[in-house]
Image (cartoon, helix red, strand yellow):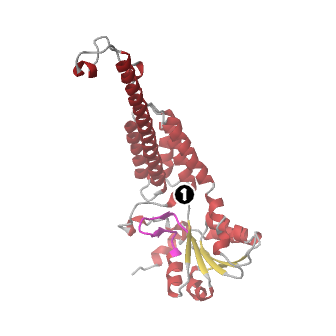
Amino acid sequence: VNITLESLVFRLKRNQIPSGFQIALETALLLRQMVSAARWSDINQLITQIQKWGSKLIEAQPREFISGNIVRRVLFLIREEINNASNDSQEEKQTYNNHTMYTSIEGNLERITSSPIYSSMLNLLGKPSDYEPNSSQKQTAKVNVDIRPIIIQGIQDIVDELEKTHTDISAQALDHIHSNEIIMTHGVSKTIEAFLRAATKKRKFTVILAESFPNDHASSHASIISLANAGIDAILIPDAAVFALMSRVNKVILGAHVVFANGGVLVSAGAKNLAAAAKHHATPVIICAGIYKLSPVYPHNPDSLITLSSPNNVVPFEQGNFLKYLTSH
């Protein structure tokens, strides 16, 4: 388990996991393996261990919120199962107490009616010296529930939910996309692509894709070919043409890396231009994201969420000799 954890931490630190879906899936599978293999005698020990593992994953990549979201869901699952088990135990205990009380009353009545007549009312209501309680009164209600398999099954349900994310989102495509619409999107997103593919089965529409230069322009070129092969009228435009074409667009559909507690979203560089142009033209914006991307975190410092990449995409290192002729202001 520790080897798997260190491997995931290593790849998170180096951004070697390509998509948020893969991060969520690997985190859920890791927690399932940990719950099944870890040694714990008290549920609080398990919660403490999972919190420690979650802190390691979050510290490995502070700008990646998905692993933390999965850890929080598993912790919520554990606490919910504890409450359910506790409530069931209390109900069984209450039922047992009621049965014990009824049995005790029957035993007392039987003792009173079958015992000899005593000379005083005090002796009549008291217990004879040879009286012993019924065996059912000696028992103590005790309920022991092994919640390990319940937690493992709950984590497996989360894994199944993750695997159906694209299918569940695509099922709502016809509710948002109508015939003869012009839709603008940005960059590459498997969720958006699956969403558009599902809508094209019964709708005829046009997609305008901003190429997201210089970070994802190569993937955008491949995505536009994939959409065209699916029978979608797809147009690739430079990022500079977004505002000029926004007046013709019916809606903007974007993917998101994470959805924050205040309703803000973390998107790829350049998508904010689409949102600003859509606001100016009063064009609706739709965000497609799985539930594993919903985070309770508030973006108090948005600048800390910006990830800086290599300038090689703008000026290749092979052309580094030309930089000495440039002057920046």
Residue situated furthest top in the rendering: 130
| 313 is higher (above) or lower (below) than 122 | below
Q: Is residue 269 rendered to the left or right of residue 120?
A: right
* Residue drawn at (43%, 67%) of the image: 306
Whether residue 141 can be seen here = no
The residue pinned by badge 1 equals 20
| 103 is higher (above) or lower (below) than 236 | above
Q: Picture coordinates of residue 243 (x, y %)?
A: 55, 86
Which of the two residues, 200 or 129, is positioned nearer the viewer here? 129
* Residue drawn at (63%, 55%) of the image: 164
Disc 1 residue type (three-letter): Gly
Q: Picture coordinates of residue 176 (x, y %)?
A: 63, 74
Quadrant occupied by the C terminus? bottom left
Q: Is residue 45 rendered to the left or right of residue 2?
A: left
| 183 is higher (above) or lower (below) than 263 | below
Q: Picture coordinates of residue 135 (x, y %)?
A: 41, 18
Which of the two residues, 225 or 134, is positioned nearer the viewer here? 134
Q: Residue 107: name its quadrant.
A: top left
Q: Residues within 10 Å of mark 1 (few under 14, many from 20)?
A: some
| Mark 1 secondary-structure assignment | helix
Q: Picture coordinates of residue 20 (x, y %)?
A: 54, 57
Residue 265 belongs to the span the image colors magenta: yes
Q: How many marks?
A: 1
Q: Residue 83: name its quadrant.
A: top left
Whether residue 223 can be seen here = yes
Q: Main secondary structure of the magenta part?
A: loop
Q: Is residue 320 rendered to the left or right of residue 135?
A: right
Which of the two residues, 220 or 168, is positioned nearer the viewer here? 168
Residue span colored magenta: 255-271
